[in-house]
Amino acid sequence: MGPGEWSNNGPHMPWMLYRYIMGELLRVFALTATVLVMVVAFGAAIKPLAADDLVGPLQTAKYIMLAIVPMLQFALPFAAGFAATVVMHRMTNDNEILAASVSGISYRRILGPIAGLGVVLLIIMALLTQLVIPRFWASMERMIARDATRIVQSSIEKGVPVRFGNVQIHADRLMVQEEPPDTGATTRLILFRVVAAKLDPQGRIVWDVAARQAVVDVHRHEGQTYLKIALADTVGFDAKTGQLASAPKITPEAIIVPGAFRDDPRFMTQGQLLWLRAHPDEFGRIQESKKKVAESLRHLEVWDHIKAAIESTLEVALTATWGGQDRRLVVRAAEFVNGEFSNPGGAPIIVVDSESGDDVRRMVVEKAEVRRSLGATLIDPTLDLVLKSCEIEDLRTEGTINRREDLTIPNLSVEGLGGDDPSHLPYEELTARAESIGGSAKRWSDRLNGNVADLRRAIGSRLLRRYALSVTATLLLLLGATLAMWLRHSVPLVIYVWAFLPSVLDILLISSGDHMARSGLVAGGITLMWSGNILLMVLLAFVFMKLSRN
């Protein structure tokens, strides 16, 4: 009798049996996991290979090696279940389990090392899914992610438009300049004969601009790519109003290139997700929503400033710099409502145009209104002054009169307008300001609050999904071992199918519950997410009860 096996008081922990079971189990588990993970990792490379995102055999091999770690979350549970089924079925048919049971070792103690391995597997799976795998997902995506410069260059060379967000750009040709010294950009793209269009959510053109030349500066900061565009010698068309307007230069807001690493919780570790839940302002989609609220607030600020100027002085000044000369237009009216100037009784509106401080034109118009210009930014919310039925007197040529039915003067700044970019405010302050104003700002604010709530739900659901998947690995291991001991007269693969099918159903329920929780049905989603594991626990308890009776 060896130490640690028997004593006068009965059986102690059967360490020899435990070592034997663990040795066999780990051997089969390692072999099965290796085969499974290689097959699944190669399958993960099929999509980027088909899309020509992987260049050459070396990059393909590197991608597959990186894919091995994320695929462990799927390979480990099923490899563990298969190993437990095969090992325990063989030991049962060889009467080793029966001998141990007759010797006084209970089934619970026989399953002890497998339960211990299950706890270790649970910890490994939790560490993998919460800390390690997100980093490898990001590395895989970074390998196949196309650089913004390559996207623009490849599309223009092929003669097809390139799209970033809701902006679509087409050009005849381009030149690439690395690290231009004047802006700090990483790359500058000089485009010739350019057409840029802004699209609504349905893909319809809201406005488009044709330009002789455009300069696109590509900036990268903290993993995010920004495109800053300057269009020269432009003619723009607004689809809503049907108006054409020309301008020597347009500089729209910077375009944020969508980035999976920054805007997808799948690529974030548990610590990053928890930090993001406390700081939602750093999330790319939240920043886009904040920008919409800020644009609405700035629009209302501009309207209120013009209205206050008209009510106090019966005029408002709009300024611009064209061809090196300062231009100032003073609109004289009694009222300003919803962007339109008016006088009592329909009297004409007077517009005085000055260049470098000298009055050069006097315009008498029947209708005058202002609209947000194509080049408006949050810092400088420029306007287009649209005039109807104009009688233009040239003050430099002794009263020469010219008549125009329509006249649009673009890219004018409101004189004396202060304020800064409200999109940099924390979202709580931004929404509070918008709610106090109401109107369109309140609607965009409600959408921002909804997006923050969606983000936090997505983070919570993502964390719970990873833990649920980790628990599945432990349950599948125990279920495979228990079924193999109970169904000793069945074929091992048949036994494994009985454990495999509920586990696949469990993974489907976890995924479905995740989607449900992120869509807003939090309680139902979490219940559904964990129902598969509860099903495996019930099945495991039932099988163990049957085994114990036999």
Image (spheres, helix red, strand yellow):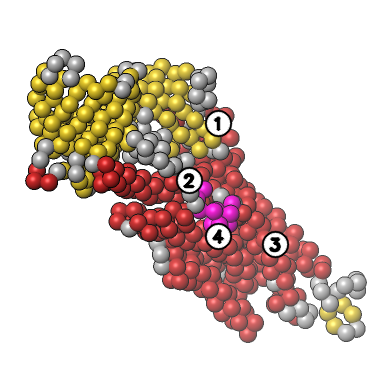
In the displayed structure image, the side of residue 78 where residue 356 appears, left or right: left
| Front position among marks 1 and 4 | 4
Disc 4: which residue: 463
First along the sequence among labels 2 and 1? 1
Q: Residue 402: x percent and y percent?
A: 10, 22
Residue 50 visible, this angle:
no
Q: Amino acid at mark 2?
A: His
First along the sequence among labels 1 and 4? 1
Mark 4–mark 2 distance (CA, rounded to whole Å): 29 Å
| 110 up-or-down from 461: above or below | below
Q: Residue 416: x percent and y percent?
A: 37, 37
First along the sequence among labels 3 and 2? 3
Secondary structure that dominates the magenta span:
helix
Q: Secondary structure at mark 3?
A: helix
Specify the label residue 120 is tagged with: 3
Disc 2: which residue: 424
First along the sequence among labels 4 and 2? 2
Q: Amino acid at mark 1?
A: Gln
Determine whether label 4 and label 2 are within 8 Å by CB.
no
Which residue is found at the position 30% from the left and 56% from the top?
Answer: 439
Q: Residue 382: x percent and y percent?
A: 32, 35
| Front position among marks 3 and 2 | 2
- Which of 114/85 is in front? 114
Residue 170: quadrant of the picture? top left
Q: Secondary structure at mark 4?
A: helix
Specify the label residue 59 is tagged with: 1
Magenta segment: does it hold 274?
Answer: yes
Task: Tell me the crowding category of disc 1: few under 14, some 14 to 19, or many 20 or more residues within 10 angstroms, Cα based.
Answer: some
